Image: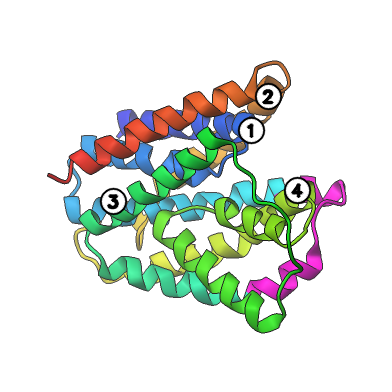
Amino acid sequence: MFEVLALYLVVGAIAGVLAGLLGIGGGLVIVPMLVFCMELQNLPNELIMHLALGTSMASIIFTSVSSFMAHHRRGAVEWTVVRRVVAGILVGTFLGTFIAAGLSTGWLKVFFVVFLYYVCYQMLSGKKPKPSRQLPGMAGMFGAGNVIGVVSSLVGIGGGTLSVPFMVWHNVPIHKAIGTSAAIGFPIAVAGTVGYITNGLGVEILPPYSLGYVSLPALVSIAVMSVLTAPLGVRLAHSLPVDKLKRAFAVILFLVGTKMLVSLF
């Protein structure tokens, strides 16, 4: 048990540093590392991705609060956008957990790998969407929230990889898009966590100290360490060549995704 907790603490520490250093969502780091840790524990294969996704979602509750509060203090959160998109986010994320619960670990891995490749392309190409239009009305924002929520719940992230480009496309300044995305990450994490707990409550072969598809030892370890180490990542970001580090990290993500893909065969 102590060895497992030590592994989870390491996961949280690395996730915190990378989140502060590269500005990436914790789920992109936490999910594959949790999969690795859970495979070392010889947990049933059919549970691993569901537990990794649910635990990642729960950890984002804690990291998103500190993040969006910091952005709010700088006036970088467009709360009108949050209010318009939050209904779609809550519905999409919650429904997405039911889709995930009905999929096998294999299909969830495939979906996660495809998403990793998409993020790698974004990081390596350095492409940024050109602002070209205004944000849609309530129906459009509800639909956008649905899509962001469903995808976020299927890959265990806070949604920034999707919501930031969406807002920039619609003429929201980049610093406000990032701050608003951090605020949107909180309802995504809450709805996703509730959904993964709900869907996992009836599962009999869960490991000890699990609440549905959320591993409590992993959650506590990751939440504590990521909050402690994120400031270190922020300090490093001001002294290291972040653009080069992002490209190097994209290569690492590509290798991680490829390893997950190969493990399916």
Judge from the rendering whether residue 24 lies leftward or rightward of residue 70; answer left or right.
left
Q: Residue at x 48, y 55 (%)?
A: 57
Say which residue label 4 marks. Answer: 174
Q: Amino acid at mark 4?
A: Ile
Sequence-wise first label, 2 or 1? 1
Of badges 3 and 4, nearer the viewer stands: 4
Q: Count neighbours of disc 2 (C-alpha within 10 A) and say few if under 14, some if 14 to 19, many if 20 or more.
A: some
Q: Which segment is the magenta one? A: 68-86
* Vertical order, 226 against 138 (above or below): above
Q: Count neighbours of disc 4 (C-alpha within 10 A) and say few if under 14, some if 14 to 19, many if 20 or more.
A: some
Sequence-wise first label, 3 or 1? 1
Coordinates of residue 104 in the picture (x, y in percent): 22, 61
- As drawn, the residue found furthest toward the left would be 265
Which mark is drawn over residue 72? none
Q: Residue at x 76, y 68 (%)?
A: 134
Sequence-wise first label, 4 or 1? 1
Judge from the rendering whether residue 265 lies leftward or rightward of residue 154; answer left or right.
left
Of badges 2 and 4, nearer the viewer stands: 4
How far apart in space, not on screen, are marks 3 and 1 (Cα)?
26 Å
Q: Amino acid at mark 3?
A: Lys
Say which residue label 3 marks. Answer: 109
Which mark is drawn over residue 237? 2
In contact (CB < 8 Å): disc 2 and disc 1: yes
Say which residue label 1 marks. Answer: 20
Quadrant position of the N terminus in the picture: top left
How far apart in space, not on screen, are marks 3 and 2 (Cα)?
31 Å
Does dot 2 land on a helix, a strand or a loop?
A: helix
Q: Main secondary structure of the magenta part?
A: helix
Q: Is residue 202 visible?
A: yes
How far apart in space, not on screen, are marks 2 and 4 (Cα)?
18 Å
